[in-house]
Amino acid sequence: MSKTVGIDLGTTFSLVAWVNPETGRPECIRGPYGTSLCPSVVSLDEDGRIVAGEPARRRLLTQPERTIYSVKRLMGRGVDDVQDELRRFPFRIDPESHNVIRVRLGERYFTPPEISAFILREVKGWAEEFFHEPVTRAVITVPAYFNDAQRQATKDAGRLAGLEVLRLVNEPTAAALAYGLDREQRGRVAVYDFGGGTFDVSILKLIAEGEGDIYQVLATSGDTHLGGDDIDNLLLDLARGEIRRDLGFDFAEYPESLQDLRKTLIAAKHELSHAAETTVRFLLPGELAYVRRLTRDGLDRLIAPVVDRTFGPVRQALSDARFKPSEMDEVVLVGGSTRIPLVRSRVEDLFGRAPHVELDPDEVVALGAAVQANILTTGVQGTLLLDVTPLSLGLETMGGVVAKLIPRNSTIPASAEELFTTGVDNQTGIDLHILQGERELARDCRSLARFRLPVEPAPAGMARVEVRFTIDASGILQVRARDLKTGQERTADVQPSYGLSGQEIERMLVESIDFAEQDFAERQLIEARNEAETILHATEKSLAGADDNSLDPAERASISGAVAALRQAMAGTDYRLVRERTDELNEATTPLAELLMDRAIRSALEGKKLAEI
Amino acid sequence: MSVSSLAFPACWNCGAPPGGGHFCVGCGKIQPLDPASGYFAFFGLPEKLNLDAADLDRRYLALSWKLHPDNFVRAEEFERNLSLDRSSVLNDAYRVLRDPVSRAEYLLARHGVRKEGQTKQQAPPELLEEVFELNESLEELRAARRSGDAAESVALARSLETAGRNFQAKLGEVDSELAGAFGEWDAALDRSAGEDDRARLMARMNEILNRRSYIRNLVAGVTQELGEAPGE
């Protein structure tokens, strides 16, 4: 059976992990750049090919027009939702896009799920490289506070990357799962997850039960648009303002330079997590230089409002779980932004205890995803996650008021059943509007979907349609309807308010399947060719070392034949053939290798004898 | 297809009578839900209102291990849907039965005594006078705040606090009244009381629940109003 991986599809970085069956522990898989962090950056090169990860991040400086980062902020959102982001992020959005945003990279347009799929495909490739076999199934993590549309968009991205998404797991829950492996802790756990673009907090109860450990999430809250990005933007605003004021320089014409400045400021931010002060030095186009001393105190003052914003959700989650901060037994920090000393001290102050930071905050979520992937593929083995839905699910009723069907923090899977009837004679359908959110009025909640239940024409009030709303274990809504009078199942054609339709996914899938297989074959080919090169080189060297008399002419001929066959295979694109020919050459050179080995041993013995004399 | 809606006389897998539980007694496969069986039956419990919370927790966790979709990731879609249905109902049932008030409301709704969203929001007659005064104080407080009369606001808030405490105490009284009714209901079940007896008890509980809901809303209103006080 092929391996199932856990993937943390992050705003800034994405990671892939698996559970090593030899150790039973989760491990992150490193990519070709030696790190497990794959930048969540995608770029379209001049030949129209997609580049993702580190090479794309490098292109951010040279080709900002063709490159995108932080696309997670756009997942499952409509054009109207992101106006705020547009002022902050250099997203080039197709003005024609409707319920799904389309982003321009160079001359082409992509939806956020497609762009995320390119990132997923990149880390999937890392895993395939590592396992030497295709990977087709994954558990992907999402911010706990992601709504239905954002979750669906993530699942779509997985499908587009050629992955069967077995489950979406909430990031803080995954982190708790990763920690649970390392420590025998029981009790109440608060997970504070401050990442690149999202903030989540979850309150969990760890229950040791007869059959194993249950991780029961009691409450979760968060802000899907609050993260390290916001801190970076504050620094960027500050520097931009000073540069304009003091140097009279404006970045409007220099998007490349602005990205470069952003990178410099992020490096300074990272440095201030260890040092008390640092100096930003930045060369502007036209021989101007911006030099600024930045202290940790200064940074703290600047970012305090952003850090403050995380504590609203923290108090909400605690109050929903009916706990005081002091009642938590453990506090876990997750996400790169928790490296900031101010964040750590504020969390410690609130809970009155030192938070756990033993696991790398960048890796912990991916590790937890791998644990869940392992649970799902090997069957429940002593660990069960009971997560919750972060937002209430409701229906719009008369006057635009929302009737709640499933309250927030309900354990998932969760469901609700409603009975509907008609208001006028011979009505042929009942319109439903599904929403997610805590507000009283529909217009203040998130629209998930609108759809029409078909009914047989009848006098008003005679129709009886039962609708079952189910939130699955990934937090995604399913709707089923049944006509009680006829007993007939009614398929409700649920059109998502912000998301791709089934047909759009199918179309993209067709496009991407070619892509995926091609990708895998291409990587395999490169690898097979490299291997072949190595053995060819070794063979040539050996042949040169063996004089004509010592090697049987028939063997020499067979080696030459195998070399020629391998060279021919390498000129083609079939990686299987290259591997086959490599193996054949290996076999053909066995007598040669033995010969050389004999000779080496003999000369070694002779040397010894000489020495003994 | 909806799997919850179809009544299966025989196990969908082995054809034998499945035995009415979550899993077929013959082949062990998960079974479709019978829409007529309620939350109590789901846990294998009688419809009693005094419920041992620790016992319910145990039953819930034991069933979670068995019914959760984690166990069915590799199963066919049909079985996966059965697990989704059963595990979602398990969570819904646990959420409803864990809380005594929602437990009682559920029981009454199940027997057609109480309808969701159609509960009467009328002031109980014996509270009419106090409710009237309370609403008046609330209105005065809002008016004083609008006009920026700080001293008056503080005085009114203080008297409102007293009234809020008064209603909070009444809520406690209603709760003990409800607990008494729970005991009577359970006793009625034990002695297999007739329909009339049960209907009378349910009507009484419904009346108590309506009163409780009304008072609770009052208390919530006062708490919210005081919580919004500026300068606190």
Image (cartoon, grey):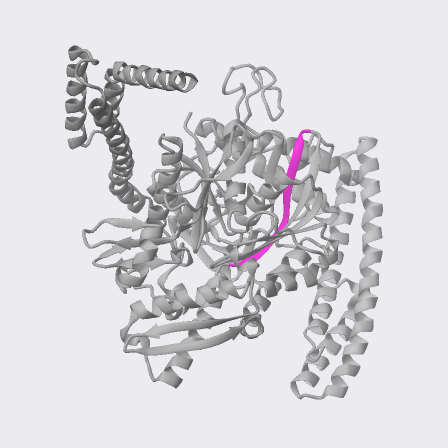
Residue A103: x and y, percent?
30, 59
Instruction: Name the quadrant of the C terminus of chain A.
Output: top left
Report the residue at 62% width, 64% height from top. Answer: A311
* A155 relative position to A201: left or right: left
Is residue B112 at least partly visible in the picture? Answer: no
Residue A120: x and y, percent?
38, 45
Residue B201 or residue A499, whichever sits in front: A499
Quarter location, residue B56: top right
Residue A252: in magenta span = no
Residue A66: x and y, percent?
26, 59
Vertical placement of B71 versus A346: above or below?
above
Report the residue at 34% width, 38% height from top. Answer: A162
Report the residue at 39% width, 15% height from top. Answer: A609
Span of residues in magenta:
A211-223
* A65 relative position to A116: left or right: left
Residue A144: x and y, percent?
53, 51
Residue most toward the front? A613
Instruction: Name the quadrant of the N terminus of chain A.
Output: top left
Is residue A230 at least partly visible in the picture? Answer: yes
Residue A214: in magenta span = yes
Vertical placement of A315 versus A386: above or below?
below
* B162 relative position to A454: left or right: right
Residue B68 or residue A245, whichever sits in front: A245
Which secondary structure is most common in the magenta stretch?
strand
Report the number of numbered marks: 0
